[in-house]
Image (cartoon, grey):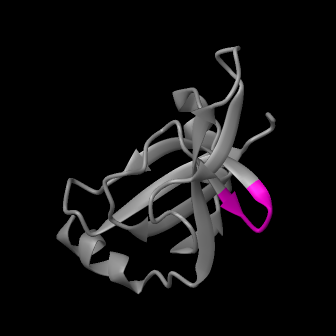
Amino acid sequence: MAREYSNRKHYIKDKKITILEGVNQGPLPDEYTWRPIKNGENVWAYYRQATVNEHNNATLAGYDVEAIFRVNWRDNIHMDNRIDFRGERYEIIRIDDFEGYKKDLTIYAKHYKGG
């Protein structure tokens, strides 16, 4: 395990993402306007598509993973947030803080097909 943690620093965070939160704007419970969270614009991130094995394992666990983002640790990212990357919206499926070390967050996501 210690080796895995030490290897985490080798991920190059060279992509910019925006982390969004939904703000209820209408009379219906699901009428959201998406806006960046506090300090959530132009966040440096490592990005890659999920491997076939990661995708298959996630499917067996009951969720779908298409992309993996890694950002510096922060405490204001939640499962109900979205990620905007290169004009595409991603729904956050899982957030891994690697045993609470507060170094990085690995965010597992899939394309968001909603509005």
Give residue 72's quadrant in the image.
bottom left
What residue is shown at x 40% (from left), y 85% (from top)?
10
Residue 53 against residue 60 in the figure, above or below:
below
Q: In the drawing, does residue 84 fall left or right of residue 36? A: right
Q: Quadrant of the C terminus?
A: top right
Prevailing secondary structure class for the magenta stretch in the rendered image: strand
Q: In the drawing, does residue 3 fall left or right of residue 91? A: left
Farthest residue in the top direction? 28
> How many labels, in total?
0
Q: Is residue 69 magenta?
A: no
* Rendered location of residue 114, percent (x, y): 79, 34
For this rendering, which residue is in front, 58 or 17? 17
Residue 106 against residue 55 in the figure, above or below:
below
What residue is shown at x 32% (from left), y 65% (from top)?
73
* Rendered location of residue 38, percent (x, y): 45, 58
For this rendering, which residue is in front, 88 or 107? 88
* Rendered location of residue 1, percent (x, y): 21, 64
* Rendered location of residue 47, percent (x, y): 60, 70
The residue range painted magenta reads 84-88
What residue is shown at x 33% (from left), y 61% (from top)?
74
Residue 41 against residue 93 in the figure, above or below:
below
What residue is shown at x 53% (from left), y 73% (from top)?
45
Q: In the drawing, does residue 88 fall left or right of residue 103? A: right
For this rendering, which residue is in front, 59 or 96? 96
